[in-house]
Image: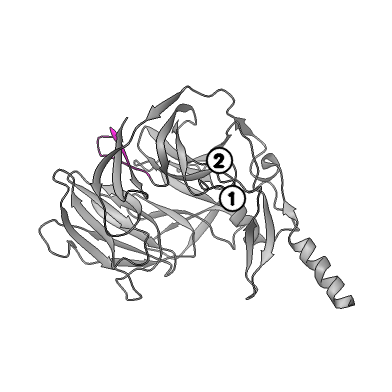
Amino acid sequence: MKNLFYLLIFYFILNISCLRKTEEIINSKIIRINDLPETENLVFKNFFPYQFGVPLKILFTDTNIILVNRNKNSKKICYNYNITDKELISCFIDRGKGPNEALGIFSAGINNNKIWLHDVTKKNILVFSIENDKAEGLGTKIERFNIVDLFHIELVNDSILWGVGNLNSENKVTIGNIHKTDYKEIGNFNYIPQDVPLEIFKEAYSSNIFSKPDGTKIALAYRFTDIIEIFDTKDNQHITLQLKEKFEPNYNKAEAIDGHLFMEKNMKTKKAFIDGVATDAYLYLIYSGAHQNENSWSNGNQIYVFDWEGDLKKIYETDRYINILGISINCKQLFSYDEETGNVIYADI
């Protein structure tokens, strides 16, 4: 009976709801965004039906639209379409454990007409070019680079890696060169609670990461608090912004059967930023604001548009819920995917 009592006490302590002020945790000099621009309606239209799974990323070249799959049941990772006639040209990168295959893609992008894929499961980056006249679509051999364990990354100027999600680091961002093995950590948290294990804390304050195409800025959009941080890649100086809702990560500390510690969502856990896309002028971020028990938890129907100085320029309200964003080369159309209809969709901006 005594053992049961202590077990219940341990369970209670482990699962108490964790809630701290963001100025305590992230940055004492937070810029509050209290004045919001008028909301504009954004109506998506069908671009083409997509039958090979559910896309994680939508990438563009001058002539192509490339869908990077998240679906574990799809045989290939990338599906390459001609953007004019919307015909499938090629598909490439098998799903698997082989050296030139991938298992868990979380980040992807294009630099100088080369695609890069970040495989979280295998802890590596695949880099390759595509050519439309080759059946397999691979214009050069696939380069593979092993990296540290990160949640999301951006590859800047072909080789400089900026990443988030290193659960063993007390910092926000990891920087490295994919051709080398040394890394540095930047972006200190003001305060890390002693009663919260580091891996749980880092999950609660996890973010998505986006880079300005010219490589001069990096943005973190937090997942469980309405915070955005913009870093200058030259001197690592940054600003911290918070939306009007001003909510904190709300979670329980939990331990799995195998001893793995994790952030357990509860009825008060809210989702902030889902995904986004960056241009040299603006940062477009899908915002949810939904609680964990709501159907729209993993989607959003608002797109916040920031410039790289941190000014909120525009808010779009979309005609449906979405969870990914891409943008055309000319920056005149936003692209997404409609999970209900299976269509790649677009809207003029």
Q: Is residue 108 left or right of residue 241?
A: left
Q: Which residue is mark 1?
A: 292
Give residue 79's quadrant in the image: bottom left
Label 1 and label 2: CA atoms lie apart by 10 Å
Query: Image quadrant for the N terminus?
Result: bottom right
Q: Say which amino acid is labelled 2.
A: Gly
Question: Residue 148, relative to residue 333: is it above or below?
Answer: below
Q: Residue at x 53, y 57 (%)?
A: 165
Nearer-the-camera pick, 255 or 122: 255
- Whole-percent x, y for residue 154 in the image: 41, 51
Q: Say which amino acid is labelled 1.
A: Gln
Give residue 133's quadrant in the image: bottom left
Magenta part of the chain: 325-335
**Do callouts 1 and 2 mark residues in contact (Cβ within 8 Å)?**
no
Q: Is residue 240 visible?
A: yes
Query: Image quadrant for the C terminus?
Result: top left
Say if the magenta span includes residue 271. Answer: no
Say if the magenta span includes residue 326. Answer: yes
* SS for callout 1: loop
Q: Which residue is mark 2?
A: 289
Nearer-the-camera pick, 222 or 184: 222
Q: Residue at x 79, y 61 (%)?
A: 13
Q: Residue at x 18, y 45 (%)?
A: 83
| Colouring of the image | one colour
Please identify the residue farthest to the front as the structure is shown. 341
